Image (cartoon, rainbow, N blue to C red):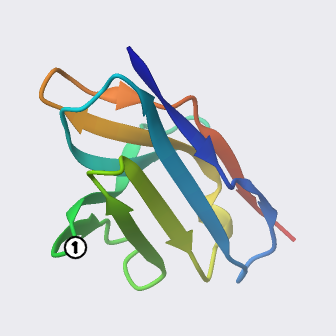
Amino acid sequence: QGQLLESGGGLVQPGGSLKLSCAASGSIFDIYAMGWYRQAPGKQRELVARFRSGSDTYLSASVKGRFTIAGDIVKRTVNLQMNSLKPEDTAVYLCNAARIGGSLWGQGTQVTVSS
């Protein structure tokens, strides 16, 4: 068994920046992609960004140009750099690891963008 450990959430003013980090621990060695989802109150969970390799990344249209995802599948880590944050980015951000044997989820970290 393994788990995903997230860090980096918090409260930030509009226009500010935060960096989220996620690392896998334990006996999970079949990860082929890692990414971040978010869920705001009353809304569906949505994919924000996904990393497979340096040349294979995905960013949702709502964050493209403001967020950057980087990671290392071998090291089982993924980071999300969030710049120019907006109040509508407020949500619980969840790390996800796509595995051959099924997805693994972190517990989530709260990001609040407010003045």
SS for callout 1: loop
Query: Which residue: 42% across, 56% down?
Result: 78
Question: Which residue is tagged 1?
Answer: 54
Callout 1 crowding tier (Cα within 10 Å): few <14, some 14–19, many ≥20: few
Q: Residue furthest top?
A: 1
Q: How many marks?
A: 1
- Seen in the image, is 96 located left or right of residue 3? left
Quadrant in which residue 115 is drawn? bottom right
Residue 42, image x and y in percent?
A: 56, 35
Q: Nearer the viewer, residue 23 or 59?
A: 23
Judge whether 15 appears above or below 54 on screen: below
- Seen in the image, is 56 located left or right of residue 2? left
Query: Which residue: 38% across, 68% down?
Result: 70
Residue 11, image x and y in percent?
A: 81, 59
Residue 97, image x and y in percent?
A: 32, 38
The amino acid at mark 1 is Gly
Residue 98, image x and y in percent?
A: 23, 37
Judge whether 36 appears above or below 106 on screen: below
Q: Residue furthest left?
A: 100
Quadrant in which residue 10 is drawn? bottom right
Query: Which residue: 27% across, 52% down?
Result: 73
Q: Quadrant of the N terminus?
A: top left
